[in-house]
Image: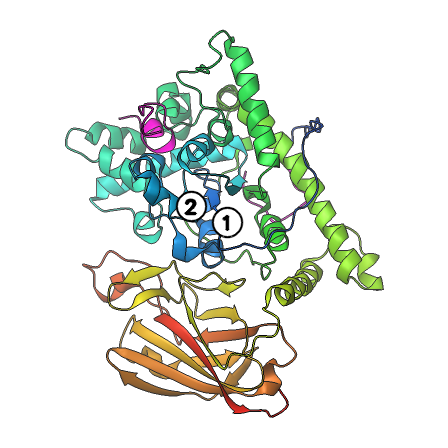
Amino acid sequence: MNLALEYLTLEHLTPEHVTQKTDDRQTRYNKPTWHAMTEATPTNLVEHDIQPEDTLAFIHVPKAGGVTLGALIDPMWLPGARCPVYMTLPLARFSREQIASYRSFIGHFNYSALAQLLPGKFKCITMLRHPFSRQLSFLRMLKRLGESAAEGTTPPVLEQIGNPFFRQIFEQANLEGSEHTLHAWREKPLEVLVEDEDLQKKFGLLNGQVLQLTPLRPVAGRLPDQPGLSQGEVEQMLLESARDNLANMLGFGLQECFQDSLYLLSFLFGWRPLPDALRMNEAPHPLVHGNLPPGVLDRLEKYNELDLQLYDHASALFEQRFRMMTDTLLERYGNRQQVRLTRPLPADVMDELLDKHYRSRLQSKNPAGYTGTSSTFTFDQAVSAALGWHRREISPGQGSFRWTGPGRQSSIDLFPLPGGDIQLQLVICNAVKPGLVDDIIISIHGEMLPCASSSTEGETLLQCVIPRSLVMHAPYLRIGILVPETISPHSLDSSNPDIRQLGVAVNRINQEIIHQEENS
């Protein structure tokens, strides 16, 4: 089976289906940056507040940092209306009515497939990576799958992440009679795998980023509605359409500039500044593609001529937008000392400016004149800030919940109720091991509060009282949850394949006004 076709494209459906990572912003790939922007390319920054009626898509380019980014943005990306599948063909098998019921999509989708399957307009973000690094990272993952097969184990990374693509690759290659495939992946040197053009084609690695982002739908290297075009003309159309499509997305990032990409997305969507503190599906040892033999680099360049041009264009556009964001933040929120600083700004200054931007955007979203005395937050709702949480899960008896982790500290920002002290109640539906709930510390805006616990019907309730003085000057209620430790279920029970670091599972968060002030 051609997995590139099975999971990334709609080519064979009938019509009715219809470098090394761095945080240094001044370090870029050493080829000249391509600055030939088309006149139609939008360079302005379009700030967007996510609305319930939006249709959103995060197009995850394989091996471009999408697993980590997806985990970070998951609480903000309309989780309650999320499409449950990650790849194109499973999505295409849904009915039109079912597809129309979803408001957000995260996965290895082709843009052209989404344009065909989704009703109406949709808004996208994506993350790109230098083509050489992306391709080598993919091949190294194949070698890791082969090593796990030789050991008779499932690669831990497949249990850790919610991306089924590599799981499907592993399971297919692990079928009876496929041992030679896994053996080859394991034993062949990386440069030999690079030489295997059929392997690159099988997994959609040849100019794969252009093909994933173009709105056009090539079939066998041709455009069905323009059969007379030469191969060179088709490739140029694919490149130009992918380039223009990228520029018109809500936002995009570069894996090599991951923290800056998080900054830019935080600015565009008005989120709490996202930190580059999470690592998921990362190779155990970095690989510098510049150290490979010249012949291998020549082969990689041949395989990625279009992707290299797309990446150069994306790099130039990203740097331009990042400068525009920096100028905008300084103009709106900067003091005299900050305005005089040399660019790029220090990380602490950027965090401070983006936090002011987040507060401003949040104040504009908080309903004016709200007079309610109680509220309940559930994890099928989107928020503007939630850090330190695993992906949303659903229990038939308890609805949506999220595990805290992988670190000990988790936090979430909610709109506070006005007019008095607030009784806060966290409803915990599970803990990775007994007794963990007893030692949880709850904080509000960093201040620890005493809390009481009680248990009922399989749930644990943690309650504390928040003085109005703690929240009256903030546009949000920042709730911190500190667990004594996070543990993998696998370490507690070797038969459990789940190696995620978990703390407690939070089901909902209740607020209720007590001690109402007369003049509030």
Between residue 16 and residue 211, name the one nearer to us.
16
Q: In whole angstroms, how far apart are the C-alphas of marks 1 and 2? A: 14 Å
- Mark 2 surroundings within 10 Å by alpha-carbon count, few (fewer than 14), some (14 through 19), many (20 or more): many
What is the magenta segment's predominant secondary structure? loop
The correct choice, above or below, for 372 with respect to 297 in the image is below
Q: Which residue shows up at 59% across the image and 29% down it?
A: 243
For marks 1 and 2, the one nearer the N-term is: 1
**Does the residue at mark 1 contact the one at mark 2 (Cβ under 8 Å)?**
no
Q: Which residue shows up at 73% across the image and 46% down it?
A: 323
Query: For the residues carrying marks 1 and 2, which lies nearer the camera in this image?
Result: 1
Tell me the amino acid under the disc marked 2.
Answer: Ile
**Quadrant of the snapshot with the C terminus:** bottom right
**Quadrant of the snapshot with the N terminus:** top left
The correct choice, above or below, for 64 with respect to 279 in the image is above
Secondary structure beneath label 1:
loop
Residue 12 falls within the magenta-colored stretch: yes
Secondary structure beneath label 2:
strand
Q: Can you give x and y, in whole percent of width and height, for residue 150 in the image? A: 23, 39
- The magenta span reads 1-29
Residue 54's tag is: 1
Residue 126's tag is: none
Q: Can you give x and y, in whole percent of width and height, for residue 242 in the image? A: 55, 28
Does any portion of residue 284 appear in the rendered image?
no
In this view, which residue lies farthest toward the left?
A: 176
> Toward which corner of the image does residue 500 lie, by quadrant?
bottom left
Does any portion of residue 228 appear in the rendered image?
yes
Q: Which residue is mark 2?
A: 106
